[in-house]
Amino acid sequence: MAQRYDARGNIYIVVAPEELRRQGIDLPHQAGHAAQTRQAWAVAAIEACCSWAPGTQPVGGKDHRSDGLLVGPFQASSPFDLLIVNTDGTLAERSGNGLTIFSQALSDQRLFAQGETCELRVHHDKTDTASPGQTSVQTAQVEGVKGFWLDLGQPRFGPSAVSAVGVENALLNGHELSHVKQLSALNGAWSRSQFVRVGNPHCVTLVESAEDLPGNEQMREPALGEGLTRIAYAMPSGAGKPCAAGINLQWAMRLSEGHIAARVFERGEGPTASSGTSASAVACAAWRVGWVSAGEVKVTMPGGTAPILLEEEQGELSRVSLFGTARMID
C-alpha cells in the first residue's frame, strides 16, 4: 500500500514495487533496468499514486497530492535500491527529504532499526553522473528529536560540476561565482550564483535583501514560473539552459552567523516548501563565499529549518551531512 510522508513540508508517497505491479504497471524487477525504461512506467505510476481523486483537489492547490514518488525497496536488507520519481515522470539522482522519508518508511516496516546504518542506492537515467548514487544513512537524535543523518559526501563546485554552459564569471566579496544570464533577465538582483553538486545539481543564487527571495506563490505565477521552468527543467518541458539535464534552483540570504534563509524551485517539481539537498547546497554555497564557517549550519525554508553539518579539511569541504525527520500522514 502506498503511504504519504512529510519531511519539513516536502511530501512524498512511498510505494513498494510489487504494489505498482499489482496495479497493472509494468515495472521491471531490477531498479537499474526500471530507471533506464522509466518512460514506459513512470508517468503511469505518478497518475496512479500521486494524482488527486476526481473532485478532491483543493481549490487553487497543486496538481498532485505529493512532491513525488519513492519506489522501493527492491530488497529486504541493506543496501536498499529505490527510484525517486518527480511528478512530471522524470527521475531524480538524490533528494535529501525523499531519502529521509524513505529511511522512516524502512523504519516503519522494521527494515531499519534504531542505532543502525544503512546504504540507500538511488537509480536514475541521467548521463552526467553515475547511477546508482549511494547515500549512507544513520539513525540519530538531535536536540531530543529522533531522525536520520544522511552522508551526502563531498560537494563539487562550479559550472563543470553540473555541466553548465554559456555562463559568465561573477564576483562576491572576492569569491568567484557565476552569472547566469537567464536568471538575471528575470530579476537583476539574481546575478551571482554558485553551482553545487551534492549528488544532484544545484544553482544557488546569493542575494542581499529579503525582497529578492522569491515567494512560492510568486514562483507559481506564470510571469515568473514559466521563466524559471525554462531554466530549471530539461527539454522538452524546459529549455535545458544553462544545464541540458536541468538544474535545481535556490536563492539564499545570510540571516546571522551560521543561519541562512532559502527558497527552492526544483526541476521536475517547481516551487517546494523545502528540499534537503537544496538546503545542503545552500550551506555549501554560503561556506564558499564566507557567509558561514564549517560546522553546523541552519538553513530555513518555508517548510522548516534543516540542520546541515559541513566538514572541512585543508581549506576544502570534505563532507556535507543533512539531518532530517519524517512522519506518515493521511
Image (cartoon, grey):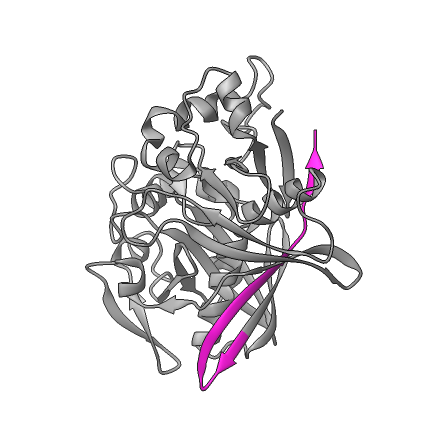
| Residue 12: percent from left, percent from top | 57, 37
| Residue 72: percent from left, percent from top | 53, 36
Magenta-highlighted stretch: main secondary structure?
Answer: strand
Q: Quick check: 96 above or below 64?
A: below
Q: Residue at x 40, y 28 (%)?
A: 28
If the image is split into quadrants, where does the C terminus sit?
Answer: top right
In magenta, the rendered stretch is: 311-330
Residue 201 falls in image quadrant: bottom left
If the image is split into quadrants, where does the N terminus sit?
Answer: top right
The question of residue 325 being in magenta is answered with yes
Residue 35 falls in image quadrant: top left
On the question of residue 50 being in view, the answer is no
Q: Residue at x 40, y 81 (%)?
A: 173
On the question of residue 28 being in view, the answer is yes
Toward the top, the furthest residue is: 54
Q: Quick check: 205 above or below 295?
A: above
Q: Nearer the viewer, residue 68 or 233?
A: 68
Report the side of 99 relative to 328 (left or right): left
The image shows a total of numbered marks equal to: 0
| Residue 266: percent from left, percent from top | 43, 46
| Residue 53: percent from left, percent from top | 57, 16
